[in-house]
Amino acid sequence: MNKKTALYDRHVSLGARMEPFAGYIMPIKYTSVQDEHNTVRKGVGIFDLSHMGEFRVRGGDACRFLDYLLTNDADVEAGQAYYSTMCYPDGGIVDDLIVYRISRDEYLMVVNASNIEKDWAWVNNHTAGYSVDLTNESDDTALVAVQGPDSEKVVQMLTDTDLSAIEYYHHVSGEAAGRKALIARTGYTGEDGFELYLKPGDAEAVWDAVMEAGKESGIKPIGLGARDTLRLEVGYPLYGNDIDHTTTPIEAKLGWVVKLKTDKDFIGREVMARQKDEKPSRYIIGLEVTGKGFPRHGAELFEGNRKVGIVTSGSIAPALGHGVCLAFVEKGYHKVGTELEAEVRGRRIPVKAVKLPFYKDGSRK
Amino acid sequence: MSNVPESLRYTDTHEWVKDLGNGEYMMGLTFYAQDQMGEIVMVEFPGLNEYGSGEILGSLEAVKTAEDFYSPFDCKVARVNETLEDEPALINEDCYGRGWLVVVRTDDPSGFEGLKSAEEYSEYIGE
């Protein structure tokens, strides 16, 4: 039985196509994926991301614990956020997540909906020796995201908090539409935007207030379909598609979230340090489709008769008007400019390795 | 509620077929199928050759998915809707009109007559 978010009735009355996703019944699209995508690129859109998982970590060892558990450095300022991977000892990725440092001894981890149970078990299995208290708040948290170049203007109408003072990947506790909210300048679209962490009982009031405030800016509700094309167009990986327990952050070009430059120990460090020294045997790269067609997840990549990789995400890039893919390829075929062919239903479609992000004009601060 | 015109016949693979007379049949994607697929961004057409019943004629790429379309019976493809190469979204906007896919020829009307009626197709898609 799929769960409903607190905003389920809103989606249905907006005419969304609702489909099961990660144990929830979620809006895939309201009008069209391309239209919703372009709305976020050029104006502002509102998303229900309440399916995401939230774990609170409190205690005197919270920072030390997260430093051991996650690959990125937990020692950021209170009010800051960071993106990280959480890995197995062999370097494979348990999940990718955003972590908000609420205060010196308190953090909020936001994980992928499809991984909530697995992550919760993993996190709890590593608390020995750390004075931390963990709470799974996933069912008690609603998440409304407002994304796009006009998002600050719209969200500012709902709050006394001066949003212009919140830098990218920072957050404050405040109020939105009179309801308690964690207001974060984060997102996964490549655009400027805010994520509002709320009590589920407040979600409808805040959603309605954002829709009202955004009327003049032409705000639209955005489904998970456009969320996927938005993140792909800026080259962000999606857990389960591009990265999983068989891939390491180094291979996934997420080395920037692995704190190998510090002397802190963390799960997977040894493997990642070695991999970084020896260079991985394969890499995630961006491919632009130069021929006709759209290679999708699972399409094999060839140079001549030699299979050299596999597409992990593929779609049209709505803001660019051509197909793009993320793909794993063998070392040697990962350089920008490399020309390969993707096999789709027995036919070969020419593709070319390009620099990420595909879309370079995002409003992300 | 899907739009299933009475005057057309339908395949199990969600193509509609219209008898144009003189052994010519026009076909396209049903309203139900284009709605399921979402915005179509590319159409691949068959060559003007002979195809057996159920053989792949071409493919449709939507933003999130791709589907093939199939020959409804033994036939020869007479012409394709080239307008769709520039405006594939016509399939979503007007699937029974300007969004038609191909016109095929056959001298044997039994294939067409064996296709689903509007009523049968409506039942098939659960409406």
Image (cartoon, grey):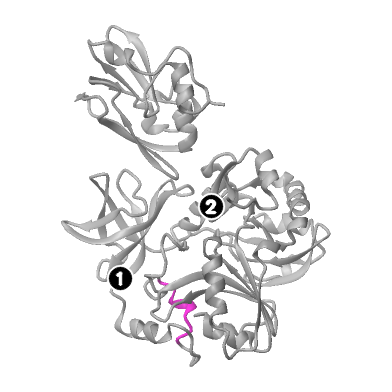
The magenta span reads: A253-260
A120 sits to left or right of A310: right
Type of secondary structure dominating the magenta stretch:
loop
The residue sitting at 70% across, 47% down in the picture is: A217
Residue A282, which numbered label? 1
A265 sits to left or right of A364: left
The C terminus of chain A is located in which quarter?
A: bottom right
Q: Is residue A126 above or below residue A196?
A: below
CB under 8 Å between discs 2 and 1: no
Say which of A360 and A34 sits in front.
A34
Chain of the residue under the numbered disc 1 shown in the image: A
- The numbered mark, 2 or 1, whose residue comes first in the sequence reads 2
Count the numbered circles shown: 2
Rendering quarter of residue A203: bottom right
| Secondary structure of the residue carrying numbered label 2 | strand
The residue sitting at 70% across, 44% down in the picture is: A9
Q: Is A254 in the magenta?
A: yes
Q: Position of residue A197 (x, y in %)?
A: 70, 63
The residue sitting at 39% across, 18% down in the picture is: B116
Mark 1: amino acid: Arg
Q: Position of residue A207 (x, y in %)?
A: 73, 51
